Amino acid sequence: MLNIFHKFIHPKQSRMTDQKPQEGDKKTPPINPPPVPVHQGDAEGQQHPVEPKVEAPTSDSSTQKNQADGRESRKNIEQWNRNHRQTMYGIVINSILVGITGISIWFGYRSLKITQDALLVSQKQFESANQPYLQIASVRDSLRPNRPPLVNYTIDNLVSQPAKIVMGKIGIEIMQPDSAHLSPWMLYKSQKKIENYPRIEQYAIKESPYSDTWTADNYITENEFHFIESGVYHVFFYGDILYVSLVTRHELRYHFRVELLAGQRKQFQIWENDNQKISDTVRNLGELLGDFSPKP
C-alpha cells in the first residue's frame, strides 16, 4: 500500500528507479552543482557565501561609449569651428590690411605726383623768371647801287637775366614776294641744329645790348636797286642765333626776320620774332665764362 502511494506521488522517480538499464544505453554522468564561493571564516570559524559580481548590462556599456564618442566628436567639431573662425578672421584682417596698404600706396603716389607736378611748375616758373629774352631792336641799312649791302643792328635783352650769344647766322635776301619758298632764311630756320654757324661769343644784358654790323660779300647792281626801290624786289634781314642763359645754363634759340624798307634807313617791319628753348642740356659754366675770343 505504501509503495503504490509513493509511486503515485513521484511517478518519474518511481519509473526511473523501477526501470532497469538496458544494454547499449549510455550512462548519464551526474550533474554536480557549481561550488559556491565562500569567505574565509570569521573569528568564530564560520564561513559565509560570497555574492557573485553582477556585470553591467551590455546595452549600458554601448550607450556610455556612444556618449563618450559623441562628446569627443562635439569637441572636435567645436575645435574645427574655432580654427575655421580664426582662419576667416585672419583672412578678413589680412584683406583689410592689404586694402589699407593699397590705399596708403595710392595716397602716397598721389602725394608724390602732386609734389612732382609742383616741382615741375616751380622749375618752369624759375626758368621763365630767369630766362633771357632777346629782341631785335634797331636796324639801319645802307643799300646803294654798286656797293655791298651794309646793316647795323642791335639786339636787346628785355629781362635782367644775362645771356651769352654763342653763334648765329646773319644775312639778307633779295627776292620777289611770291618766291618766299626759295628763301635761304626758310632753310636756316628749318634746321634743328645750328652747330656750323659762325661763332659770336658775346654777352647780351639788359643794360648793355649786343650790337654789330653785317656786310654782304656781293654788290647790288643798279638794275636790282631799281627793282628794290619800285617794290618789285623785297629785302629781308634775318638772323638765327643760339644763346645760353647764364642762370639756368640752358640753350635757347632766337630767330628773327625783318623787311628793310627802301629809302627809309631807320624803318623796318618785323615778320618773325621768336625765342625758343631748344635743349635741356646744361652748358659748362667755365665754357660760358671763359675766353670768348672769336674762333676762326
Image: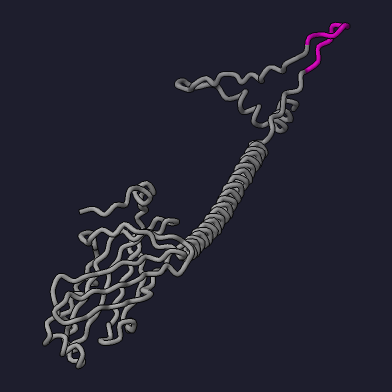
Q: How many marks?
A: 0
Q: Quadrant of residue 134?
A: bottom left
**Residue 117 in view:** no
Q: Nearer the viewer, residue 226 or 67?
A: 226
Whether residue 42 is in magenta: the answer is yes
Quadrant containing the N terminus is top right
Residue 138: x %, y % from top left: 36, 76
Q: How is the image coloured?
A: one colour
Q: 138 or 256: which is nearer to us?
A: 138
Does residue 203 appear to the left or right of 176 in the view shown? right
Query: Residue at horizontal 87%, vertical 6%?
Result: 43
Q: Which one is in front, 12 or 186? A: 186
What residue is drawn where x is 52% and y is 19%?
27
The residue furthest right is: 44
> Is residue 252 found inside the magenta-colored segment of the image?
no
Magenta range is: 40-49
Q: Quadrant of residue 62?
A: top right
Q: Quadrant of residue 40?
A: top right
The residue closer to the viewer here, 47 or 220, is 220
Is 161 above or below relative to 218?
above
Secondary structure that dominates the magenta span: loop
